[in-house]
Amino acid sequence: MPAVRFQPGDTVMGRWPGSNLYYEVKVLRFDPKTQLYTVIYKDGTELELKDGDIKSLTGFKQGRSRSRSRSRSPARTRRSRSRSPARTVRRSSSRTTEVRKEKFKEVLEVRLTPVAVPLENNSNNRHEKKEEKKEENDTANKVNEKTEEESENQVGSRYNLRRRKDQGDGRPAELEKKLEAILPQATPREAVKTTELEFGGRFGVLFWLLFLPVMVLALLILCAQEDASLLNFPLTPPPLHSLWDCQVFGIVLLWLLFQAVLSLLPIGKVVEGMPLKNGKTLKYRINGFYALIFSAISVGAASYNEVDLSYIHGHFLQFYTSALIISILLSVYLFIRSRWAAVDDLAPAGNSGYVFYDFFMGRELNPRIKDFDIKFFCEMRPGLIGWVVINFAMLLAEMKHKNLDTPSPAMLLVNGFQLLWVADGLWHEEKLLTMMDIVHDGFGFMLAFGDLAWVPFTFTCQAYYLASHPSDLSAFWIVAIMIMNVVGYYIFRKANSQKFAFRRNPSDPALSHLKTIPTATGKSLIVSGLWGFVRHPNYLGDLIMALAWSLSCGFNHVIPYFYLIYLILLLVHRNARDEHQCRKKYGLAWGEYCKTVRYRIFPGIY
Ligand SMILES: NC(=O)C1=CN([C@@H]2O[C@H](COP(=O)(O)OP(=O)(O)OC[C@H]3O[C@@H](n4cnc5c(N)ncnc54)[C@H](OP(=O)(O)O)[C@@H]3O)[C@@H](O)[C@H]2O)C=CC1
Ligand SMILES: CC(C)=CCC[C@@H](C)[C@H]1CC=C2C3=C(CC[C@@]21C)[C@@]1(C)CC[C@H](O)C(C)(C)[C@@H]1CC3
């Protein structure tokens, strides 16, 4: 029996069955009985390959440089494309296996998009369009050539391998279901282990697990003090009764229930999320904006009927501890239920095998109870809508405690700006489905705590501060801050909408003025307009708005600047995470982009 040449986790070059094309794949396991390796392609397709169809990366590079001219011929590429890509997926002589192979072939048929794809971006003039395409194809080839020669990681990324799932007739999905029934899993599938640990690794997350909840508590205690100076922080812990109240806990549970019911109402469209690892998509009901309106009407009606909403201000610490306890319970539930989750349902970043790390990052990608998606719900509803309700309660508390007939201008600005931000997020709720939080991150303590405790209790700290601290703004400052928020919002919205529209339809005539760089995946990167100014204009806009919110609270204390500081740290970290992913995804094209657009978030800062 030949020795097993590759181990699970090895990155190797795997031949696409029935062709001479090799792609970078990861070895998942080896079955000694069938002598087949199970490998996973970059698009998530798993196949079984025989030993002869696998080469080591180094061996492949050597062989490849000898035969480069042959393998580069587009004609060859086209021929191989028309072959049956999955013909040799499983080797067996039995007739039933032949039937299976045919089914498998249909399911796993892939679209091979050559690197030198015509550039998606467009031009109004047809002739110009041709010229432009030619020019950009050349660039694409150049990028690719460099890729082959210079980057080992990029070997084999000449084609974009995607399952042909999105044909619209639902056939492949049906076939896949049938296939699941026909093909018993020979060996139980194992999830790919997370090896790149983030947030300081297994010990780092322990720190965050303890530090984040305590930090929010400290922030709230400081905010409520008459002198909110950091130097004046009380050294004695708060009494237990100021942290816990059963009635408050009940109100928080009711709020969650109310929001859950609103999210399940059959109002609003149902859309499909991004394709998962197994090619399937999940459905989501988009009715967040309606939920905001319903909530506003309910809160307005309660206030009109003399329900004292300033109660929230008086019991704010108790509200926070209730939300914290619920987020911990939810994280424990999520961690336990992830034990039964299918391999395909696990998040790539939450399966390290270290209990605390996986608990923090979240093991399951899209935990659901029937059609109720817990992560999507928590991200957009109770915390985000809770934020504006709490802000409103702080506004009423300010009027009550300071005996005012109308709220202060600073309180009105903070309420108005943040309501706009939340309403905008809910109006564009569908776009969240393409964001890394939904597509990549698991649902664990980080997001559960972030959504249910961090968002409603730290994002509201400006309004909480203003309820008991003055901020006298001159008319000049009011106008200046309003202009700043409008500019920030314009950049934030325009950048996000432009990228979303471009990803949905790169040849949208409305975007024809944009310059782009092609990448080896077939997608392009925008390099003009806002996306040519800095590499994350949407972050810049968000930060300008955050500055406007903080400035509304004056310069007496640093506490109202907490949100701004948090957002800078979060977005700088997120930018680094995203750039790391993009470099892996786009290789040299990303390098080109970084050379063309040199600043990351802040103009003038690399
Ligand atoms: N207030 C808060 O707490 C937070 C707010 N936010 C806000 O959420 C919004 C979304 O943020 P986030 O999801 O992090 O990041 P982005 O919306 O910026 O998404 C990054 C992705 O965009 C694509 N991309 C990057 N550059 C280009 C380009 N030049 N042309 C085309 N596509 C490009 C890449 O994905 P691909 O190529 O695969 O499409 C990249 O992975 C931001 O406005 C941010 O400010 C985010 C986090 C926290
Ligand atoms: C310290 C800690 C626990 C951090 C957790 C961070 C999360 C609270 C945030 C990470 C990214 C977020 C986004 C939104 C809410 C906060 C979290 C979850 C968001 C959904 C709010 C609405 C916006 O319009 C948005 C869609 C742009 C935004 C996306 C990111």
Image (tube, rainbow, N blue to C red):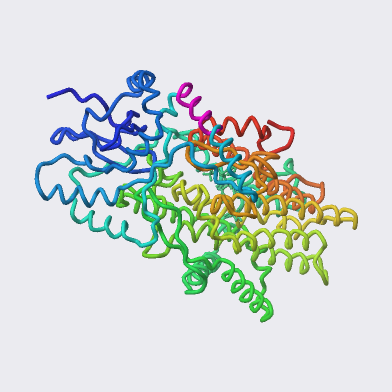
Q: Nearer the viewer, residue 429 or 300?
A: 429
In the image, residue 553 above or below residue 20: below
| Residue under the point 37% across and 28% down | 71
* Location of residue 432 in the rendering, given as x and y in whole percent from the top left corner: 54, 55
**Does residue 447 show up magenta in the picture?**
no
* Location of residue 366 in the rendering, given as x and y in whole percent from the top left corner: 41, 54
In the image, residue 550 above or below residue 308: above
| Number of residue marks | 0
In the image, residue 212 above or below residue 39: below
What secondary structure is the stretch in magenta mostly built from? helix
Is 432 left, or right, of 55 in this rendering?
right
- Residues rendered magenta in the picture: 139-151
As drawn, the residue found furthest toward the left would be: 94
Q: Nearer the viewer, residue 421 or 564?
A: 421
As drawn, the residue found furthest toward the front would be: 127
| Residue under the point 21% across and 39% down | 88
Q: Nearer the viewer, residue 4 or 577?
A: 4
Is 422 left, or right, of 176 in this rendering?
right
* Location of residue 181 in the rendering, given as x and y in whole percent from the top left corner: 20, 56
**Does residue 147 show up magenta in the picture?**
yes
Q: Nearer the viewer, residue 433 or 264?
A: 433
Is 328 left, or right, of 76 in this rendering?
right
Q: Quadrant of the C terminus?
A: top right
Identify the image quadrant of residue 568: top right
In the image, residue 301 above or below residue 598: below
* Location of residue 499 in the rendering, given as x and y in whole percent from the top left corner: 60, 49
Q: Quadrant of the N terminus?
A: top left
| Residue under the point 61% across and 63% down | 427
